Amino acid sequence: MIEVKNIYKSFENKDVLKNISKVFNKGETNLIIGRSGSGKTVLLKSIVGLHEVDSGHIFYDDRDFTSMGIKLRKKLRQEMGMVFQGGALFDSLTVEENVRFPLDMFSTLTTAEKQKQVNFCLERVNIRDANTLYPSEISGGMQKRVAIARAIVLNPKYLFCDEPNSGLDPETSMVIDELIHSITVDLKITTIINTHDMNSVMEIGDNILFISEGEMCWEGNRKEILHSTNQKLQEFVFANKQYQRIRDDKIKQ
């Protein structure tokens, strides 16, 4: 579980986050949504420590991340996994070497133990017989799955995903969504996803935070979002006619 309490963040005297408080639950896909420039990316980066907040607190379970020194933060980061927007695989490393990279950096496992963990994670994301291939030799969807395998190879308690479906076709995006959700539930990870993909919201939005102009504007789940009367939320989610049809179909079910 991750909790943010009364978070404020500004850049050059411009308030970007204004009194954000939210609990992100363990074993659920927690989504942060909002328009470009709403503050959702700043919030995610603040949670992982890439930005220092001006005030407020960020708790990882009962540990106050905001008050930690460098050594304690470094130790806590070993409990985190990160899926970057573009996948961020190393072009010069094979699939297997990319997944093994965190183990080489942070673990004391033997070579055989590392190999076993790498194979387990690749199988978990449904990748087989691709260990020796390079990122340029696999599809965009497979690259994202390799990135997920790398993110979970250290058995993290916390998983962060920044626009995991960026650049993917709708069908592949659904596969990635289902994969992240199943891993979250099966491994009981606290997962936070920064996204603007409304299909993701409708399919895996267990716990959703909508940010508008740096403020917490709405929270709920994928079922509640269909019936929300929040005007800003409605304008954001259902501006596209395709999503209006998705809402209508979901309500009928």
Image: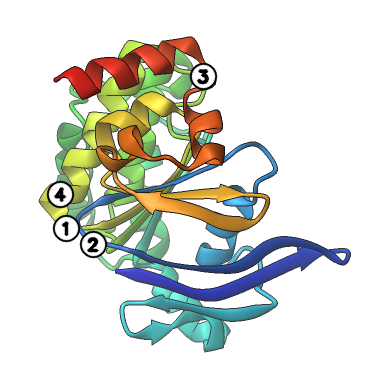
Asked if the residue at tag 2 contacts the one at tag 1, i.e. Cβ–Cβ closer than 8 Å, the answer is yes
Sooner in the amino-acid sequence: mark 2 or mark 3: 2
* Helix, strand or loop under label 4: helix
Image quarter where the N terminus lies is: bottom left
Residue in the picture at 31% in, 65% down: 107
Asked if the residue at tag 3 contacts the one at tag 2, i.e. Cβ–Cβ closer than 8 Å, the answer is no
Q: Position of residue 198 (x, y in %)?
A: 42, 27
Residue under label 2, please give it.
26
Inspect the image, locate mark 1, and give the three-letter code of the amino acid beneath it.
Lys
Image quarter where the C terminus lies is: top left
Marks 2 and 3 sit apart, C-alpha to C-alpha, by 28 Å
Specify few, some or many for label 1: CA neighbours under 10 Å numbering under 14, 14-19, or 20 or more.
some
* Relative horizontal placement of residue 182, taking residue 136 as reference (left or right): left
Inspect the image, locate mark 4, and give the three-letter code of the amino acid beneath it.
Val
Residue under label 4, please give it.
185
Sooner in the amino-acid sequence: mark 3 or mark 4: 3
Marks 3 and 4 sit apart, C-alpha to C-alpha, by 25 Å
Asked if the residue at tag 4 contacts the one at tag 1, i.e. Cβ–Cβ closer than 8 Å, the answer is yes
Marks 4 and 2 sit apart, C-alpha to C-alpha, by 8 Å
Res 103 visible? yes
Residue under label 3, please give it.
167
Residue under label 1, please give it.
188
Specify few, some or many for label 2: CA neighbours under 10 Å numbering under 14, 14-19, or 20 or more.
many
